[in-house]
Image (spheres, rainbow, N blue to C red):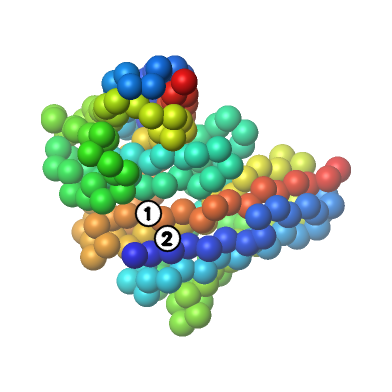
Amino acid sequence: GENVEQHPSTLSVQEGDSAVIKCTYSDSASNYFPWYKQELGKRPQLIIDIRSNVGEKKDQRIAVTLNKTAKHFSLHITETQPEDSAVYFCAASMGNTGGFKTIFGAGTRLFVKA
Amino acid sequence: GAGVSQSPRYKVAKRGQDVALRCDPISGHVSLFWYQQALGQGPEFLTYFQNEAQLDKSGLPSDRFFAERPEGSVSTLKIQRTQQEDSAVYLCASSFASGGSGTDTQYFGPGTRLTVL
């Protein structure tokens, strides 16, 4: 079945710096890759997603890139702010062929130091 | 508008008790997912519904876990004879359409934190 690996598990950056989180997936049938932000005690919230027919997507300070050949995708946060501190999860969905399963990575705890 | 809601928000059960966790998806959302999130881990897929049909239950860890969505809206996750390893946050998510490829955005509920003593 699908496996999603995410790294680093912890990332500490200075306010204003960029943060990059990387994920790899195993099943080439995966076709949808969302990223969620989860603050302590809160629900995961979608921050950006990318579909398999697109290589890059950007939304203000957040961007995601997808390399289907290498089966990896990355989250880029620029000009980080203290409120970006949270746990970030990547995920991969296999859609119809995979029974609609969405497999999450283990998460990256991002600390943005003021 | 109202988001996904779950109840109860917290549940403490003695080992061996049965529990029922409820999920109210966003009105009109076809797809509904249940996940289990252990402390410090990512959500783990349990099961998926498209309307009232349970299309994938491959993530349910044992036959003690049972989920239903009889009218295609509210869903209940039931855990029988709870064990300590069942302690986790149970998250429900819904999305608008099946899309044939399961690629729609999932909106999560706040979760139910289950503690089994």
In screen coordinates, is B72 left or right of A100? left
Which is more N-terminal, label 1 or label 2?
Answer: 2
* Above/below status of B2 relative to A96: above
Q: Residue at position x 41%, y 39% from top?
A: B36
The residue that label 2 is drawn on is A92
- At mark 1, the secondary structure is strand
Q: Residue A24, image x and y in percent? A: 52, 69
Residue drawn at 36 percent across, 47 percent down:
B45
- Residue extending farthest to the bottom is A69
Describe residue A40's horizontal placement relative to residue B16 as left or right: right
Q: Is there CB contact under 8 Å for labels 2 and 1?
A: yes
Secondary element at image label 2: strand
Residue nearest the viewer, comparing A113 with B87? B87
Can residue A32 be seen from the camera position used here? Answer: no
Q: Are marks 2 and 1 on the same chain?
A: yes
Subunit ID for the residue under disc 1: A
Residue A100 image position (x, y, % from top left): 28, 55
Residue B94, image quadrant? top left
Residue depicted at x 43% and y 71%: A26
Q: Is residue A74 left or right of residue B117?
A: right
Residue A80 seen in the current view: yes
- Say which amino acid is labelled 1: Thr
Expressed as whole percent of the image width and height from the top left, the position of residue A84 reads 69, 45
Query: Which of the labelled discs sits on residue A90, or is there none?
Result: none
Give above or below for A25 relative to B107.
below
User: Would you name the residue on which mark 1 appears?
Assistant: A102
What residue appears at the point 84 percent right and 52 percent down from the top-left corner? A14
